[in-house]
Image (spheres, grey):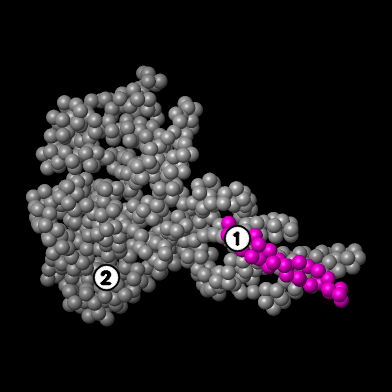
Amino acid sequence: MISKTTIDKVYESARLEEVIGDFVQLKKSGSNFKGLSPFSDERTPSFMVSPVKQIWKDFSSGKGGNVVAFLMEHEHFTYPEAIKYLAQKYNIEVEETERTDEQKQEANERESMYLVSEFAQKHFFHMLWDTELGKAIGLSYFKERGFTEETIKKFNLGYCLDQWDGFTKAAFDEGYKLKYLEQTGLTIVKQDAQNPNSPKTFDRFKGRVMFPIHSMSGRVLGFGGRILGNDKKAAKYLNSPESDIYHKSKVLYGIYHAKQAIAKDDNCYLVEGYTDVIQFYQRGIHNVVSSSGTALTPEQIRLINRLTKNITVLFDGDAAGLRASLRGIDLILEQGMNVKVCTFPEGEDPDSFSKNNALEDVQQYLEEKSQDFIQFKAGLLAQEAANDPIKRADTVRDIIQSISKIPDAIKREIYIQECANIMKVSEGVLFSTLAQMGKKGDSADSKTQKPEQKAFDVVKNEAPQEKVDVQYLLERKIIELLLLYGNEKEEFEDLVLKENESGDLILEPESVEAKVYEKIFLDLQDDEIELANEQFRQIYYKLIEALNQDSDFTISTFLSGLEQQLVSEVSSILMEEEKYTLHSWERKDIYPKEKKVGVAQLVSETILTLRCFLIKKRMTALQDHTKESQQDHRETLEEIMNYLQLNKLLNKKLNRVFS
């Protein structure tokens, strides 16, 4: 268990915008920051970060919270993991009590797999540096590749001894279970028919140099291993199998080391292999990642898209199947990103070129030789087409097919003009071809659509707007007022219901000084109003308690003690105003005026509006009752008339037309 002292220090030290900035490219937007959602596929930024309130809100997915909530959502950390991550980032010593055996047993399987992977990385690193075989074989290989000791340590490279189960036995000695060694793919288990209770175990990566694969936050997800022997039957490179923590299609090698440079340089170099990444990084170009030998996927592209809109794809000079690799470019275009392509001289790849040239020369080459995708593709395909008119026509269609993937209409038009210029074809023909491709795409989508979806698409613009839940909005506003102004002392105008000399009901104002939370609590208590929304109700009572106990109430401290579900709701309430202003989407006869009217007036109007709504709701219920019941309704009608008069007085006070 982590001590409360440590947790408090973490919350005091952690800056939300700094932490999130490690994962998402943030840009200043007024007093806040904004960026692309790290939780969904979007092209228009809807991810908001408030440095003042120390909360974030992702309007595309609905998620939100504080700094710990972000790490739990984005990195799938447990609460203790998030605290430890922040403690390490801000150099805070973690005080914790030793976990019991029972608590260790309760650790989820995912965390156990992470722990096994982290142990494996340390073990392979130790074998490389601290054993004679590791130094003679593994370390010698890395140095022959031109890697410095600093680089080898930076990327935590290692070596798995050429023994059948040397690593597995070491893991057993440290108390790691076979179940998790097998689930992470580090150990291969084969059942023994003669002795089923004692299966045979083998190290998956025996005799290989090891490349740990990290998440964006630096956790070890899996490994890539390169064989050093001459066994032709064995794969040259071997990756960890898919697991609960390692999904090849969602991981980029080097992203942990490259993320800050990618955001800073606003560009990402995409290469093919582990050594390409490492050699580039060692040369001084840090904004580089690799898809690790797998075909590029939309998930990998979106990972880059969180940090930059610009990708430069680097191909080997003699890369086999270069034309097939163009599919990856189309995927990048579909994500609305800007893509350039750079090929190296024949016989060179990013690894060898960066090793054999100075940093300035590599940078100059990348700058001069990087082509826009359409120039690259047109040049490549035009060479294949030569003087064959049929192939040339196919080449043009292929290029238009890529252009059709671009979501931005202006970019599409500019690329059509560029294509027309390069391929010597009229723009009109190209636009016509593009339109035909669009129709075919729509037709294909239509065929795969369910009938009910088609019907929805036809009427969606004519569908009636969802009815506004007035009580929900008012209760939400009450929570917002408590969060923002709860401890502020204001002078309020209380309304006391009295009869005048004529016997008519009147509202008589009385001046009262109180804190905002006191005013709200007493008004709701006097009217016996209970918040209808369950989450709001939970937050409300926790807020009243916190404000009553702590005169130095802060949102950050309050959030640290809430359940994750409530943290998300509070963040949503506080950040909603950053995206919308209430008067732009709510009916003015329902909702209070803008905040500029002053806190006291806003509080009073919110409570009065809620009273009006509940009175009207009660009158409707009584009217329905009189229609259904055959009993004498005189008392009910009298009650309705009283409510009617009170509602009229309250609406008059709110300067609203009585309805």
How crowded pointer 2 is (Cα within 10 Å; few <14, some 14-19, many 20+) is rated as many
Q: Is residue 499 above or below residue 17?
A: below
Q: Quick check: can you spot residue 555?
A: yes
> What secondary structure is found at the residue carrying circle 2?
helix
Say which quadrant the C terminus sits in: bottom right
Q: Of label 2 and label 1, which has the lower sequence position? A: 2
Q: Is residue 434 above or below residue 89?
A: below
Mark 2 or 1: the one toward you: 1
Extreme residue toward the right, this view: 632
Q: Amino acid at mark 2?
A: Ile
**In the rendered structure, which segment of residues is drawn in magenta?**
487-514
Q: Quick check: can you spot residue 542?
A: no
The residue located at (15%, 63%) in the rendering is: 367
How crowded pointer 1 is (Cα within 10 Å; few <14, some 14-19, many 20+) is rated as some
Q: Position of residue 571 (x, y in %)?
A: 51, 56
Q: Which residue is mark 1?
A: 489
Q: Position of residue 63 (x, y in %)?
A: 48, 55
Q: Is residue 174 above or below residue 363?
A: above
Q: Which residue is mark 2?
A: 400
> What secondary structure is found at the residue carrying circle 1?
strand
The residue located at (45%, 60%) in the rendering is: 60
Magenta stretch holds residue 491: yes
Q: Position of residue 395 (x, y in %)?
A: 21, 68
> In the image, is 49 to the left or to the right of 502?
left
Q: Main secondary structure of the magenta part?
A: strand
- 193 and 341: which is toward the camera: 341
- 568 and 369: which is toward the camera: 568
Q: Amino acid at mark 1?
A: Lys
- 314 and 499: which is toward the camera: 499
